[in-house]
Image (tube, rainbow, N blue to C red):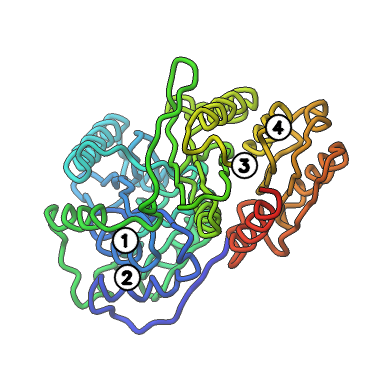
């Protein structure tokens, strides 16, 4: 866990001033489409500015402090939107708090959470945290109870990276949350601390109407990865169901690359969208798909079911071959993580249609040795140098593939290629490979 502390002058003028300074400390996440999760109400004002500055997506993380009897601001624990409870045993013991009170307070706060969700985001499901860079923000940390509950709730959904970002915090609170985040960004930890509002000239409460307005403004803003004008949402038939895809076809198109996402990801994967955008600029059509339904995606077994992923990708290729606009385009496959194994299985089954394969941080070893022997399409395996285990698995897979197979190692990159410039290198190598073979 990395802890970044920046020196600033206190007090902040207001939340907007604090947010602008915090956004500068987070600028290394600009362009990576981070998900900014704001703790309402004050955190929403912070989150809106940070999301705009980083070209990220803004949503809420709803957690509530459990207050002591007669002292609502004194935290004895917290509860998240799923009803998971974090308790402070020392405070509970010190105040002789009964189990009945804890149950009643938890039920009360959970009801407030659900009421807020209905008011703030009517009809909108909470955003998925899986495989995303997630930055949880608030206007400050006093006890850290609410932030701890928020981080634990997000971590359970397996984000690619989890960051806690606050303008000001008590040093003991930062220490308490250290185990729950990959990185902490805090502008100041004054001593003595006393209260968050003490470090703002204007710390007036946000009304619920202001929170809703900030969220509505964020929803109305163009997303960082808005589909190009030549893109459209399609439905791909796959047995008794349909899977969704985003199809982009430049005019003229030189070839078509189908994306097979990895476990826990989707067609909205920011990493795949970065690569797809680069390929579109080179004149390649791209098809990003949800290989799993929402229900399937909640089960880890389905995420690692290579046979199922392969069937879905096969159905997409079959659909492409029947579309007049696409049927004559040479086909390439781009696979990430487990999606790489599915891509290789399809390439082995369709040697005449699949002209090239690129794997990003992929698991080609999850395709059987028999399948690897049959892959005729030129294959590029892109792996981060620091992703040592996956790198060895890729080398093993390469040794089993008699066809043209190359490994391209990105120096200093980890499994998700979050490092500065890493995804740009992936895009360049993928573009060059498809440019050569399509």
Quick check: marks 2 and 1 in contact, CB under 8 Å?
A: yes
Label 2 and label 3: CA atoms lie apart by 48 Å
Label count reads: 4
Q: Residue 17: which numbered mark, if any? A: none
Report crowding for label 4: few under 14, some 14 to 19, many 20 or more residues within 10 A (C-alpha).
few
In the picture, measured across the screen, residue 40 lies left or right of residue 374, that is left
**Residue at figure coordinates x 51%, y 46% from the top left:** 286
Quick check: marks 3 and 4 in contact, CB under 8 Å?
A: no
Residue assigned mark 3: 330
- Residue 213, given in percent of the width and then of the height, sits at 16, 56
Residue assigned mark 4: 352
Label 2 and label 1: CA atoms lie apart by 7 Å
Q: Residue 47: which numbered mark, if any? A: 1
Any part of residue 179 in sight: no
**Residue at figure coordinates x 67%, y 30% from the top left:** 346
Q: Residue furthest bottom?
A: 9
**Residue at figure coordinates x 37%, y 48% from the top left:** 91
Label 3 and label 4: CA atoms lie apart by 10 Å
- Residue 57, given in percent of the width and then of the height, sits at 36, 55
Quick check: marks 2 and 3 in contact, CB under 8 Å?
A: no
């Amino acid at each position: 866990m990395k802890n970044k502390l920046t020196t600033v002058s206190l007090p902040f003028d207001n939340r907007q001033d604090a947010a602008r300074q915090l956004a500068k400390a987070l600028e290394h996440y600009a362009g990576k489409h981070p998900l900014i999760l704001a703790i309402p109400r004050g955190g929403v004002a912070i989150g809106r500015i940070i999301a705009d500055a980083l070209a990220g997506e803004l949503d809420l993380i709803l957690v509530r402090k459990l207050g002591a009897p007669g002292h609502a601001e004194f935290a004895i624990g917290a509860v998240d939107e799923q009803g998971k409870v974090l308790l402070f045993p020392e405070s509970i013991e010190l105040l002789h708090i009964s189990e009945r009170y804890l149950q009643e307070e938890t039920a009360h706060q959970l009801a407030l959470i659900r009421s807020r969700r209905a008011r703030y985001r009517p009809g909108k499901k909470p955003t998925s945290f899986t495989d995303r860079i997630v930055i949880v923000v608030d206007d400050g940390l006093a006890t850290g109870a609410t932030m701890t509950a928020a981080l634990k709730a997000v971590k359970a959904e397996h984000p690619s990276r989890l960051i806690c970002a606050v303008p000001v915090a008590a040093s003991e609170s930062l220490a308490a949350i250290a185990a729950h985040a990959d990185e902490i960004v805090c502008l100041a930890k004054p001593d003595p601390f006393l209260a968050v509002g003490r470090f703002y000239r204007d710390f007036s409460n946000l009304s619920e109407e202001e929170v809703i307005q900030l969220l509505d403004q964020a929803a109305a803003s163009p997303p960082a990865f808005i589909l190009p004008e030549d893109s459209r949402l399609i439905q791909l038939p796959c047995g008794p169901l349909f899977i969704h895809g985003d199809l982009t076809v430049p005019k003229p198109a030189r070839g078509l690359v189908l994306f097979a996402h990895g476990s826990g990801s989707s067609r909205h994967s920011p990493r795949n969208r970065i690569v797809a955008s680069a390929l579109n600029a080179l004149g390649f059509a791209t098809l990003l798909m949800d290989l799993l339904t929402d229900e399937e995606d909640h089960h880890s077994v389905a995420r690692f079911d290579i046979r199922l992923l392969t069937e879905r990708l096969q159905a997409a290729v079959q659909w492409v071959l029947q579309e007049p606009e696409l049927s004559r385009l040479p086909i390439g496959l781009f696979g990430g993580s487990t999606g790489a194994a599915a891509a290789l299985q399809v390439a082995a089954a369709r040697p005449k249609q699949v002209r090239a394969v690129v794997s990003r941080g992929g698991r080609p070893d999850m395709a059987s040795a028999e399948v690897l022997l049959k892959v005729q399409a030129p294959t590029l395996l892109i792996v981060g140098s620091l992703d040592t285990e996956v790198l060895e698995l890729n080398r093993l897979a390469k040794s089993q593939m008699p066809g043209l197979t190359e490994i391209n190692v990105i120096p200093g990159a980890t499994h998700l290629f979050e490092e500065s410039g890493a995804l740009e290198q992936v895009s360049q190598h993928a573009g060059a490979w498809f440019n050569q073979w399509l």
